[in-house]
Amino acid sequence: MEKRTDWYEHPEYYEAIFGTDTVREADFLQALSARHGTGGSQWLEPACGAGRLVAEAASRGMKVAGYDISEAMLAHARKRLTPAERRRVKLAPSRMEEFFVPELEGRVDVAHNLVSTFRYLDSEAAALAHLKGTRRLLKPNGIYVLGFHLTDYSRSVPEHERWLGRVGKDKVVCNTHEGLPDRRARRSPMRNRLRITGPGKDWLIETTWFFRTYDAVQAGKLFRNAALRVLAAYDFDYDVNSPVARGSRRLDRVFVLQPEPGAVEQGTPEKTSAPKVMATKKPSSTEKVTSVRKASAQKAKPEAAPKKKPARGNS
């Protein structure tokens, strides 16, 4: 067995597990923009990864800007675009807390980062810099659709998810472990193991990191400090007609954020001292995983997959 340590260098296997619900997510984003925003065509995806949603949005006629810290992911994203889509897409390498393009300032209709990538920003300064920078790119009535799991600090047992997928003749088994949250340090330890077996191949790719933690109060305070107001909140079922009820105990949240009226800043974002942010995604919950937008990738699914994504918590 060959051991490796950087799953970001293998986007085809990453997406076999994590490339979920692309069409449904794009439908959801368009519906949110029509209901809460401008309904316009300029989209932005922070931490766009291997570009599944970039490609889907471009195929619907959107103009798309995306960025990611992983060059391997960006290369994969560029390869999946058709010539017509490439004319509508601009991709760039960047950290989440540093991205700024002057020509996009005040012109973005929809920014989106759906599945917990935001929690890789492991300090309040980095998270705030990212939110402020994204806010400056939005139109006054534009929206930032931000999804991540809130934290239950009373949780007493680790969480574990196991996923299965295939890429061509290769079998992919993914095990993700989240340890107990540390309220004082505002983080929880993460470990992911990808086991890939196939003809002439037996790999184990193990990656560890920390996710920043947020309860509802901490998230609300951060949004206010970034001069973003919460227009609505949903869960990872992506049903625009079913916003999260006040007082819900579900922890999977998709926040629809919009700039506070009059929130205007000039100049480029200040750099923070935060460590490197790996701008990629963690699976949201045990769910049915659709095939990635790649001819050799086959349908991936978790063991005993339910019809809908269960939340981490009960409503």
Image: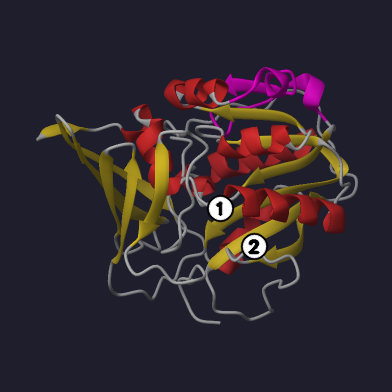
Q: Position of residue 54 (x, y in %)?
A: 63, 34
Q: Residue 168's spot in the image, x, y percent? A: 33, 36
Q: Is residue 234 above or below residue 137?
A: below
Residue occupying image coordinates x 69% and y 79%: 246
Callouts 1 and 2 close, C-beta under 8 Å: yes
> Residue at left 71%, top 32%?
58
Viewport quadrant of the N terminus: top left
Viewer-closest of 277 and 236: 236
In front of the other: 46 or 194: 194
In reply to whether residue 159 is colored magenta, the answer given is no
The colour scheme used to paint the residues is: secondary structure
Q: Quadrant of residue 179?
A: bottom left
Name the one closer to the observer, 135 or 305: 305
52 with respect to 313 (left or right): right
User: Given the image, on which type of amino acid does mark 2 rest?
Assistant: Tyr
Residue labelled with disc 2 = 238
* Residue 133 in view: no
What is the secondary structure assignment of the residue under circle 2? loop
**The magenta stretch spans which residues?**
81-105
Q: Residue 88 is drawn in which quadrant?
A: top right
Residue 5 in the image, given as x and y percentages of width and height: 24, 33
Q: Does the image show residue 304?
A: yes
Q: What type is the residue that disc 1 sits on?
A: Asp
| Closer mark to the observer between disc 1 and disc 2 | 1
Pointer 1 residue: 21
Q: CA distance from mark 1 to mark 2?
A: 10 Å
In the shown orientation, is residue 63 left or right of residue 20? right
The local crowd at label 1, few if under 14, some if 14 to 19, many if 20 or more residues have their Cα within 10 Å, is some
76 w.r.t. 145: above or below: above
Question: Mark 2 or mark 1, which is nearer the start of the sequence?
Answer: 1
Q: Which mark is residue 56?
A: none
